[in-house]
Image (cartoon, rainbow, N blue to C red):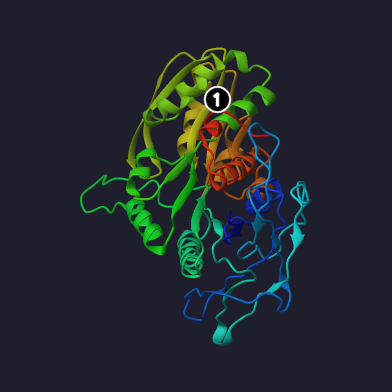
Amino acid sequence: MPNIVLFSGSSHQDLSQRVADRLGLELGKVVTKKFSNQETRCGPRRAGQGRGARGARLRGRAGPCACPDHLPGRPLALPGRADPAPPPRRRRCAGRAGARPQPEGRARAAGGGGASVEIGESVRGEDVYIIQSGCGEINDNLMELLIMINACKIASSSRVTAVIPCFPYARQDKKDKSRAPISAKLVANMLSVAGADHIITMDLHASQIQGFFDIPVDNLYAEPAVLQWIRENISEWRNCIIVSPDAGGAKRVTSIADRLNVEFALIHKERKKANEVDRMVLVGDVKDRVAILVDDMADTCGTICHAADKLLSAGATKVYAILTHGIFSGPAISRINNAAFEAVVVTNTIPQEDKMRHCSKIQVIDISMILAEAIRRTHNGESVSYLFSHVPL
């Protein structure tokens, strides 16, 4: 059986490291920079030259995490461009699968201001997974992902899986006005043309985006991790009510409410224009209850902050917001700081370290164990349905 080869793009090195740790892998470096004309170059490099990249190779099936039905085995990991100064990380699971270090690769700036991605391991015949989230400099990160996919594909890897925790352009999934693009479909086409054989993502803004692809797509859910956080961190959760800030999230909140055995409510909003809400109508009784707003993403946070005010004025005792993807652009942080939230909880599909330094209300749920287990199960040909309702240990 081929090895797992795990790469990381530049968008979220910390999440990639956590996934590698949970798979028992040693993560190394592969650096991507730009030419002076802003083009990105990606290419392989022989191992054993210079310094910078590290890797670990393991043969056979991917090793077990601490959850049921895991089969023994061993994978390999290599990352992409690291953050400029990534914090030191404890490799909690490294060595559990018996990793052995491989020769180093090197990151080198090219002439004329350009640079290249240098991969210190052969991927011929290997099962490649590339982790790149659709956040930060989205267009640069998307292009980097496409180039990495193509580089691995033409280097004769047996399969290339793009692990995209936050799918880029997911909100442009339909024509909402004349002559508007369907950018999510375009991204799907680009990933397929680049050579991706499989996509793993989390909480798509619209689940029908899976139908834009002609390759398999596994849309994982943060819901099990969210349920666990609610039970462990909100003492009054049995007296809570789950609230959707818009009608489109009704299915999401009813699922969580059913599993907690509590009631749900929703807020109908009307927009004058993008990121600006005209008015809100609350449907449901939140009086004397802890209100938990649940949504898939928050950008400028105008919606959830207005929703929090609406819930408090309707008699809610406390308001929490739980979001899968915390984009937090523009005035988002100042709005959260000024809003009456007990906490705004997000997953780490998008890096949040900088936002947390400026907002004490932001808390993070780690979903690296879900991605790591999805990779392990995909590599070993197992079902990922277990992850739709359970959090792997």
47 lies left or right of 185: right
Residue depicted at x 53% and y 14%: 262
SS assignment at label 1: strand
The vertical placement of 244 against 82, above or below, is above
Q: How many marks?
A: 1
Residue depicted at x 54% and y 63%: 125
Question: Can see residue 167?
Answer: no
Mark 1, other Cα within 10 Å: few <14 / some 14–19 / many ≥20 = many
Query: How far across and how far down the image is residue 31, in percent?
Result: 62, 70
Quick one: quadrant of the C terminus?
top right
Residue depicted at x 74% and y 57%: 87
Between residues 37 and 355, which one lies in front from this camera angle? 37
**Residue that lies at the very extreme toward the left in this rendered image:** 178
Please state which amino acid type lies under the numbered disc 1. Ile
Q: Which residue is mark 1?
A: 292
208 lies left or right of 344: left
The vertical placement of 111 against 230, above or below, is below
Residue depicted at x 58% and y 70%: 32
Question: Can see residue 22?
Answer: yes
Between residues 298 and 308, which one lies in front from this camera angle? 298
The vertical placement of 286 against 184, above or below, is above
Between residues 3 and 350, which one lies in front from this camera angle? 3
Query: How far across and how far down the image is residue 146, in percent?
Result: 45, 63
Query: How far across and how far down the image is residue 12, in percent?
Result: 60, 55
151 lies left or right of 353: left
Query: How far across and how far down the image is residue 201, in percent?
Result: 49, 45
